[in-house]
Amino acid sequence: MAMGWLPALMIIIFFVLDQATAAGANVWLSIWSNDVSAFNDSSSKHMYLGVYASFGAVQGMSTIIATILTDLLTAGY
């Protein structure tokens, strides 16, 4: 019996979200490292760090959800 298109689509969406947030974090880190004013400005540092941490949190949650969905939806196959 096949898993179905909706569960497969959900798994794919969460794995794509995982990769998109990884790429976004890399781009954000590049932007942050090119901003020389952020070195001395603590509010800029906190903003950059907060956005970078958000990318990491979303990436971690999307990986966990995709892995759990994969495990649950393919358990009988």
Image: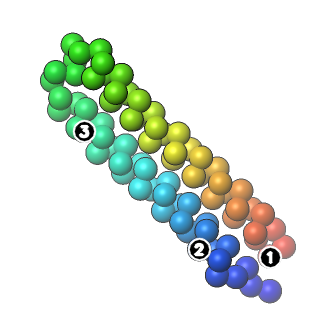
Q: Disc 3 residue type?
A: Ser
Q: Secondary structure at mark 2?
A: helix
Q: Which residue is mark 2?
A: 9
Which marked residue is nearer to the observer: mark 1 or mark 2?
A: 2
- Left or right: where 53 falls relative to 28: right
Q: Disc 1 residue type?
A: Tyr
Task: Residue at 70%, 62% (x, y): give it.
Answer: 69
Tag shown at residue 30: 3
Q: Position of residue 61 (x, y in %)?
A: 59, 46
Whichever of labels 3 and 1 marks the residue nearer the N terminus, that label is 3
Q: How many marks?
A: 3
- Left or right: where 1 falls relative to 57: right
Q: Disc 2 residue type?
A: Leu
Q: CA distance from mark 3 to mark 1?
A: 42 Å
- The quadrant holding residue 29 is top left
Whether tag 1 and tag 2 are in contact, CB under 8 A, the answer is no
Q: Secondary structure at mark 1?
A: loop
Q: CA distance from mark 1 to mark 2?
A: 17 Å
Q: CA distance from mark 3 to mark 2?
A: 31 Å
Q: Position of residue 44 (x, y in %)?
A: 27, 23
Task: Residue at 64%, 81% (x, y): give it.
Answer: 5
- Left or right: where 43 falls relative to 66: left
Whichever of labels 3 and 2 marks the residue nearer the N terminus, that label is 2
Tag shown at residue 77: 1
